[in-house]
Amino acid sequence: MGKAEAMARAKQLLVEEPPMVGTVPVLPIRGDTVHFPGVIQTLLIGRDMSVKALQQAIRKDRETLVVGQRDQSQDEPASDDLFGIGTLSEVLHVLPLPDGTMRVVLRGMGRARVHKFSFRGGSFTAKYEIMPEVEARGEQVEALMRECVSTFQTAANLGLQVPPEVMETLASIDDAGHLADMVAHHLPGTANVKQSLLEDVFVESRLERLVKLLAKEMQVLELQASLRSKVERELGQTQREYYLREQLKAIQAELGSVDGTLSDEGEEYRVKLETSGMGLENAERALQEIKRLERAPSSSPEALVIRNYLDWLVTLPWDKTSVDRIDVKKAARILDRDHYGLAKVKDRILDFLAVRQLSQSLRGPILCFVGPPGVGKTSIGRSIAESMGREFHRISLGGVRDEAEIRGHRRTYIGSMPGRLIQGLKQTGTRNPVFMLDEIDKMTSDLRGDPTSALLEALDPEQNAQFSDHYIEMPFDLSGVMFITTANLLENIPHALRDRMEVIRFPSYTEEEKLYIAANYLLPKKVKEHGLNKDQVKVAKPVLQSIVRGYTREAGVRSLDREVATVCRKAARQIAEGVTDSVVVTKENLGEALGKQRFRHGVRGEKNEIGAVTGLVYSEYGGDILTIEVSLTEPYGEHPEVQLTGSLGDVMKESAMAATTYVRANQTQFNPDKPFNMDLHVHVPEGAVPKDGPSAGVTILTALVSAFSGRPVRRDVAMTGEITLRGKVLPIGGVREKVLAAHRAGIKHVILPEGNRVDLDDLPEAARRDLTFHFARTADDVLKVALA
């Protein structure tokens, strides 16, 4: 029977068999659920209008009209939101649940067309008419039924979720319309598709549409099975828990990008990679890592390692640089603003900046600031960065003993990360910042490697354009980075590393400089920090001098800064407690704030003594004076013995032995009436403090000759210099600090090696004016001045 004949037959049925008309409660449903005639279905009812409609149906004749809802988001739909065709159903069973909802079992009895919806008492009712089906018979309908059942069975075998008893029921159904409704109920699909099948009263037409829908569903199921098989092969037996996620990836790969948007993190990394500015060779290696990430399970440890690695690659400043804004005059103002004194240091830094301003070259020497703590090495590096308009990053290397701290860790370990240089570049966001490698002389080495050797490549302007970090495993250009290193002692830096750096020495501050810094920088700063003003705290210059001499012992001003802060705290407390409105700090009440005087700087002796000589020493804390004592006694054994005490280092012990040998070889010159065959004891006071270096040679020699000859040593003379076995006096270092210590201690005459005459230019004018300098070539030149 064709469709035209079926239409004619439908009109004839409507005339011969008028549809039944009635009024029943309406049960609206939403979601993908559509209730079909001949199907027994369980629904969960929760809305008030639905519960009331169900209760009304139970009180009447247990019949209700189940209709679909056009807008699924409407909790309280209007009549226009409901479809006009639904299913007249019988309420078979109702089960109230504890949460107020109801589980209801319905049996569909037939299609119904709504003439009019009415809303009364909180629920819908409808006036309806039954829609008779247009039956179909013949070979074509029989073929459609068989094809429908066969395809449905195949779909169930491929994974379509269908209860087993449904297949048995389908095989026993002879009515074409019932079969079509049963298949439509269990077929996956949207509510709109199922609603259109419900509204179709032509059985043959419904069967044709179902066959097409089943064929389409078969294609989806077959593709799903193929993808499932593909994913399972890739994952293996031990990673099935990632099945759903991998299946989604495979579907995306099969369908491709539909709307051009990014579908996974691999594409996101590709976009970031394009904008990172990475070189072509490095970008190719990064793309390989992205492909590995896409193949790895997203929650596996391997994926975590790759993801962290890619995050580092795309965030590094491969081509991002800051523009240098070098102005030598402005740089001079910045240096003078932030630091007092250090004239020669500033002069050398300005020379360097002038060359950078004229050459516009990214490369330059590696600067190494060497000096005692607290003299402004780190802060002056920050001022250089400010004057150049660059980012500043400080890396503390004190105590670093692992090479991986510099070059990074291998990616074979979870939690590995790049070295400090690459980390600093990421933090600054440019590839030409100013790096301050602080305390480079404090690095050590152990079984994990030598970090100083790892710095050789980074601090070499000829090699650092291809710096390789163990974690990044790609060459990174460090030639644009301006490296500034700091150290307290140059001797602790390996020669190969020292050779790559241009050394700028920072002298210790003189007492006058400390007083000026304390009065004009530290005190105003601390007064402001403690919420005071200059009228509330008054500290005179003699009081600051007492703080410098009695409470600090340093080359810089860190301890001085802390002591000034302590004075301000004590004053703030007195003002806060209402004891006084202002505090005047004097020498008499200074001890109330700082306690007893903690340091006693070296002072010259009170009288000329035999066997006791004032020497000059230099350490990382600056210069100082000390007394070297020698005592000669009758030998206890057959051979004279030499004792060296006072925590002396090997070099200082060797200097003492050289001085002893010289005196022994020239004993007739110093005391012709007495042989030099006595026990010798050389002692340097403050035995708990380690001492070393060759500069005490002439001091020990003078003490030996004084003790052997019986001639006293002048108390106003201090000396320094290395002695040889032939009595030659060799030049030494730290002349400025040593001379300042002598000047501070009240010494009048200073003996220096002839080779250190050129160092007088570095001395302050006050020291050159108040001291008399004697330059010695031999031991005789020293003894002529030192012995009374």
Image: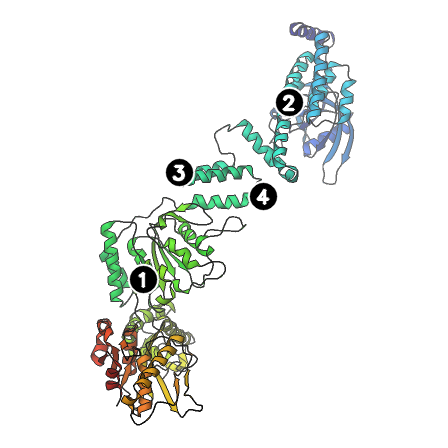
Q: Amino acid at mark 1?
A: Ile
- Is 510 placed above or below 187 here? below
State the residue lying farthest toward the bottom: 673
Q: Are marks 2 and 3 in contact (CB under 8 Å)?
A: no
* Towards the viewer: 540 or 510: 510
The residue pinned by badge 4 equals 300
* Towards the viewer: 163 or 434: 434
Q: Amino acid at mark 2?
A: Glu
Element carrying mark 2: helix
The residue pinned by badge 3 equals 280
Q: Earlier in the sequence, mark 1 or mark 4?
A: 4
Q: Which quarter of the rendered picture does the C terminus lie within?
A: bottom left
In the shown orientation, is residue 25 left or right of residue 577?
right
Q: Are marks 3 and 4 in contact (CB under 8 Å)?
A: no
3D distance between C-alphas at marks 2 and 1: 75 Å
Which label sits in the foreground, 1 or 4? 4
Q: Earlier in the sequence, mark 2 or mark 1?
A: 2
Q: Earlier in the sequence, mark 2 or mark 3?
A: 2
3D distance between C-alphas at marks 2 and 4: 34 Å
Q: Position of residue 647 (x, y in %)?
A: 42, 79
- Is 365 placed above or below 489 here? above
Q: Amino acid at mark 4?
A: Ser
Image quadrant assignment for residue 705:
bottom left
Which label sits in the foreground, 2 or 4? 4
* Towards the viewer: 346 or 398: 398
Image quadrant assignment for residue 88:
top right
Which label sits in the foreground, 3 or 4? 3
The residue pinned by badge 2 equals 217
3D distance between C-alphas at marks 3 and 1: 39 Å
- Is 489 placed above or below 570 here? above
